[in-house]
Image (cartoon, grey):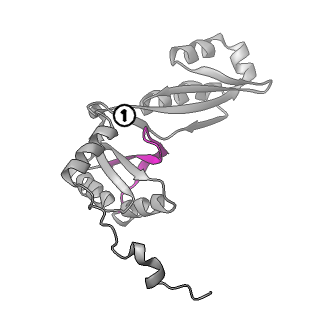
Amino acid sequence: MKQEFTITVYTENHIGLLNRIAIIFSRRKINIESLNTSPSEIDSIHRFTIVINESEEVVHKLVRQIEKQVQVLKAYYNNNEEIIWQEMALYKVPTNVIAEKVKVERLLHQYGARAVVIRNDYVVFEATGHREETEKLIEVLAPYGLIEFVRSARIAIIKDSSGFHEKLKEFEEQEPGEEVIENEFLSLQQEVFPDTGY
């Protein structure tokens, strides 16, 4: 049975990785509902947050496939009950409507929207919340002349996570990196690679 899942992917920051991850979804004809990339809590490690509607079995296979990418450190998937998530939306409405209709201002306050830009011709409001909440505000503002609307991708934090630092330590203990072996010829560089004058 299909449901909404959020996939969190920790990666090294390399050009082309987003494209390779997107191909994994397109080859399986899976639509990405939302995609966000951002720095993570660890320096030089990036975090992808991907939202899809699929069965858990399919999502489990997807995550395993994503983890096979060279620069991917770890990937998780969670349902909506296992994460804390938000989306941000911006709404542009005519200034005269806000000035004339006290009701609109009350509605915006009710939905937790705040003005971020006020001009003579329009006002831009910002609201954060779940998708249902930001979409409800579209319906509310439509009769008053909603000029423009845009919504961000989902950002999410896993409820039961102790953080990626701890997980990284666990992975290192389970699968320690290969021991570095000193090259016995390193000190004989001149003898092995004599200077030919080039």
Task: Name the spot of residue 164 as percent of width and height, x first.
Answer: 33, 40
Q: Residues within 10 Å of mark 1 (few under 14, many from 20)?
A: some
Depth check, front residue: 50 or 148? 50
Which image quadrant for residue 123? Answer: top right
Residue 59 vs residue 9: left or right?
left
Look at 50% across and 27% down and name the residue there: 128
Between 179 and 51, which is closer to the camera in this rendering? 179
Does dot 1 land on a helix, a strand or a loop?
strand
Up-down: is 165 above or below 171? Answer: above
Examine the rendering and report whether any part of residue 41 can be seen: yes
Count of number-bearing discs = 1
Which span is picked out in magenta?
Answer: 29-53
Judged from this view, the residue extending furthest toward the bottom is 196
What percent of the width, then of the height, locates residue 181? 30, 66
Between 195 and 36, the one nearer to me in the picture: 195
Residue beneath label 1, please?
Answer: 157
**Identity of the residue drawn at 48% across and 80% down:** 190
- Looking at the picture, how far across and down is residue 194, in whole percent? 51, 85
Asked whether residue 1 appears in the rendered view, the answer is no
